[in-house]
Amino acid sequence: MRCGRERIMNVVAVILLCLTPGISLMSDSPVFPAGVSFPSENDIMMAGEELLYEVSWTWFKLGTVRLKAGDQYSAEAYIHSYPDIPFVDLHSVQYTSMDSLFFSRSSHSEEKSDGDWKGLRYVTETRENRLIVEETYRKQVAAEPFRREWKDTIQLESPFFVDGLSIGYFPRLFVHSVQTLDVPTVLYGKLGLTTFRFTNEKTTERLEVLDEPVKVIEVKGTTTVEGVFGMTGDFTGWFSDDSAAVPIKGKLKVLLGNVTVELIQWKRSDWHPPQ
């Protein structure tokens, strides 16, 4: 049973996710190539944006992921498996606080287990380039922890990294560029590297909820994060071909085949998938 739950959790985290030599972001400050043009912060991070995705494997629909953008570069994700999925009863909430380039500054996640909520909390010690990982235990997801334990201390080469939720926002800055970026990534308390390959390749993708295809830009990548169960590391994401760069669809290769995440509902002021 636990094996099935971990598969879905790890799949969701990376997909929300989605040659020239890679540009490393593991120096003392984030390094970007000359000439990269960034959209204004309001084009991507819009408070109140709400995106609902459905996760499926072959023809089996596994559950949903709901993303909510808050004020000051904060976001929440609510992950729920469908009640009729055998041997899986997954309920998870993730929170992140980011800087203006969508690098993580603090985050925590909670998963319901045996009636309680067990979570991981990340505390960044910026000056020391360290990340403190704590395990937390709560009776209710919004309650204060009744127990908190140190789990690990991760030494970083710089304070610039993405977590399981900010990894879905970071690539939205670069989908209109042509470059490769290597980004330190922390998932489930382990440090690895995610490589994003931006090609500005324009195409279209179909959504079940729309009659006409959506104009998108394709992004490919891979992750080396340890402990991601059943993954090859490769993924492909499609983002809306406009200044909002909303994640439209993602595919990830796992041991069982391809898992798909697809946008099925959205709430964003004056926005509709471009067609």
Image: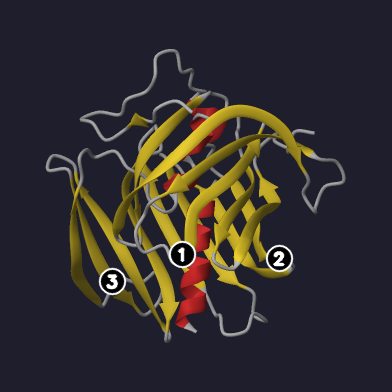
Q: Distance between the residues labelled 2 and 3?
A: 35 Å
> Which type of secondary structure does the marked residue at label 2 adopt?
loop
Earlier residue among tags 3 and 1: 1
Specify the farthest residue to the left: 128
Label disc, if present, on residue 58 of the rendered structure: 2
Q: Mark 3 points at which residue?
A: 136
Amino acid type at image mark 2: Thr
Between disc 1 and disc 2, whose residue precedes? 2
Identify the residue shown where x is 29% and y is 38%. 160
Per the image, label 3 sits on a secondary structure element best described as: strand
Amino acid carrying mark 3 in the image: Thr
* In the image, farthest residue toward the front: 19
Q: Can residue 17 be seen in this view?
A: no
Give the farthest residue toward the right: 211
| 208 left or right of 201 in image | right
Q: Which residue is drawn at 60% across and 34% down?
A: 245
Mark 1 and mark 2: span between their CA atoms?
Answer: 25 Å
Type of the residue with mark 1 = Val
Please state which of the two labelled residues, at mark 1 or mark 2, is closer to the viewer: 2
Q: In which quarter of the image is residue 153?
A: bottom left
Identify the residue at image location x=53%, y=23%: 177
Q: Residue at x 63, y 38 (%)?
A: 239
Pointer 3 with pointer 1, Cβ within 8 A: no
Question: Could you say which is closer to the camera, residue 95 or residue 199?
Answer: 199
x, y (%) of residue 78?
Answer: 52, 62
Label 1 sits on residue = 93
